[in-house]
Image (tube, rainbow, N blue to C red):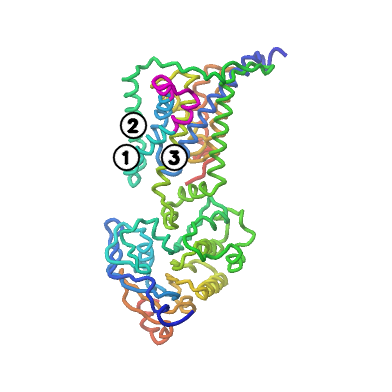
Amino acid sequence: MSHLFGIPPQALFGQLLLGLINGSFYALLSLGLAVIFGMLNVVNMAHGALYMVGAFVAWLLLTYLGVGYWGALVLAPLAVGAVGLVLERTMLRRLYKVDHLYGLLLTFGLALIFEGAFRHQYGVSGQPYPIPELLKGGINLGFMYLPTYRGWVVAASLLVCLGTWFAIERTKLGAYLRAATENPTLVQAFGINVPVMVSLTYGFGVALAGLAGVLAAPIYQVSPLMGSNLIIVVFAVVVIGGMGSILGAIVTGLGLGLLEGLAKVFYPEASNIVVFVIMAVVLMVKPAGLFGRER
Amino acid sequence: MPDGMNTKTAMLEIADLYGFYGESHVLHGVSLEVRQGEVVTLLGRNGAGKTSTMRAIMGIMGKRTGSIRFQGTELIGMAQHRIPRLGIGYVPEERGIFSSLSVDENLTLPPVVKEGGMTVPQIHELFPNLRGRGSTQGTRLSGGEQQMLAIARILRTGATLILLDEPTEGLAPVIIEQIGVAVRALKQRGFTIVLVEQNFRFAATIADRHYVMEEGHVVDMIPNDQLHANMDKLHTYLGV
């Protein structure tokens, strides 16, 4: 079997793997966006920039402090989460009572500031980040060659996504989160400190972006614009999956990554627009998104 | 329950309470008190300030002045999430059952704030309709069952004062009867209850005293045993 649908299997599986990896990043990022939107009603335009910050924290840790990949995998999300907490406490918090558009504009402005600052400091050329020793090399699966690091990225993002889904849908803390998403006033009237929950939710959501940034660092170059390239597609993913839907974000992220990969094999010209075509169709047929509920 | 000191202690004392939502001024000097173990209703027409009084107690209001004391502690100025932790349970008019939570999750959502709350089996005994429905989506219950769930989830928390906002609204007579049985059972268990009601026939079957509200303040207080003698006056107040 040297050809599958007239395509060499190497090329097909290679593109599918690329799609799966892109899909993993879409899923991680749209998951954070979904959690944040559900709780804060804020379309977090700074998400891509904070993903970039996560990657840069990893690079800075390695370059200046000699802290390697595994340390960065823990420290960078914490750092990005802390940045998120400060942003929420000092700025976003003031906008909950006004139109949601203000939250979008504020976070968009923040994204520009972050990207501008890093571009000013480090230029646009991008910094290489080495694959950690443990994950170098690859495995021959028979039908294709799987670079270990890429397999790790897919597995790690899946694990984090499923863990987050479990925490939100199946635990007590998640029940508070879901309830506060629906009716924060009443949850507060049961004695739960909702403003603190909101801050932590934002911190957690952007920490996921930071984590995605670290995972991405060895694959893509660490560059100030890495987030803005990705975030537009991620927003399309969120719209397709349904604003605020956790499962929708995960499934749609992975699915669209794969679909993009397939498009690259069969009709490369369409690969850049396939996500947006699907978005347009979904918006026409099911405006709340595939997994969303009408509000 | 022993009479004497205990029953005479005011559990909730509201004095000269003014309340605002943004620019609109909704409470104009409310004063009332609720003693331990009492069932007290707030009667009045729509917009008289009954629900607003409850929301003011819970701190769900833009601005409040005056005094709301619960067991001697001043609630005005207290962080909103700390008020229920003193032992005050709130059952809102719209019931507030969460659609993204199952019946069990709804039931166990409010944190236990004090010892002495009812256990889930005791709650099921009080509201048999909720038994065996644990994994159902909260909002799939009927209106009456949702009302039962809204009351039930407060009983777990150990709250000693319960604010019930129109528990019979929109329910069939047979369900209202069930809610009445439950509220009487709660009274016997020693809960202190403040009840907002439009349906004063229902209120008369369970309350000790009635406060009548008009235009954002209390205009009259009628003990339940004098309700009949005051029927004409009450009809005028309520416009029925």
Q: Which residue is mark 3?
A: A36
Q: Quadrant of residue B185?
A: bottom right
Badges 2 and 1: C-beta atoms under 8 Å apart? Answer: yes
Q: How many numbered marks does the figure carry?
A: 3
Residue type marked 1: Met
- Looking at the image, is mark 1 or mark 3 earlier in the sequence? 3
Residue A110: image tag: 2
Q: Are marks 2 and 1 on the same chain?
A: yes
Neighbours of disc 1 within 10 Å: few (<14), some (14-19), many (20+): few
Amino acid beneath label 2: Leu
Binning the other alpha carbons within 10 Å of mark 2 as few (below 14), some (14 to 19) or many (20 upward) gives some
| Label 2: chain letter | A
Over which residues does the magenta segment extend?
A: A58-77
The local secondary structure at tag 2 comes to helix
Identify the chain of the residue marked 1, using the numbered disc in the image: A
Residue shown at 29%/56% (left/top)? B22
Same chain check for tags 3 and 2: yes
Give the CA distance from mark 3 to mark 2: 16 Å
Considering every residue shown, the one lying at the far bottom of the view is: B229
- Dot 3 or dot 2: first in sequence order is 3
Location of residue B96 in the rendering, given as x and y in whole percent from the top left corner: 48, 57
Q: Residue at x 58, y 62 (%)?
A: B120
The kind of secondary structure element at disc 1 is loop
Image-quadrant location for residue A3: top right
Q: In x, y percent, where is residue B8?
A: 39, 79
Magenta region, main secondary structure: helix
Q: Chain of mark 3?
A: A
Q: Amino acid at mark 3?
A: Ile
Q: Position of residue B117 (x, y in %)?
A: 52, 65
In the figure, A259 relative to B33: above or below? above
- Along the viewing direction, whichever of A140 and B184 lies nearer the viewer: A140
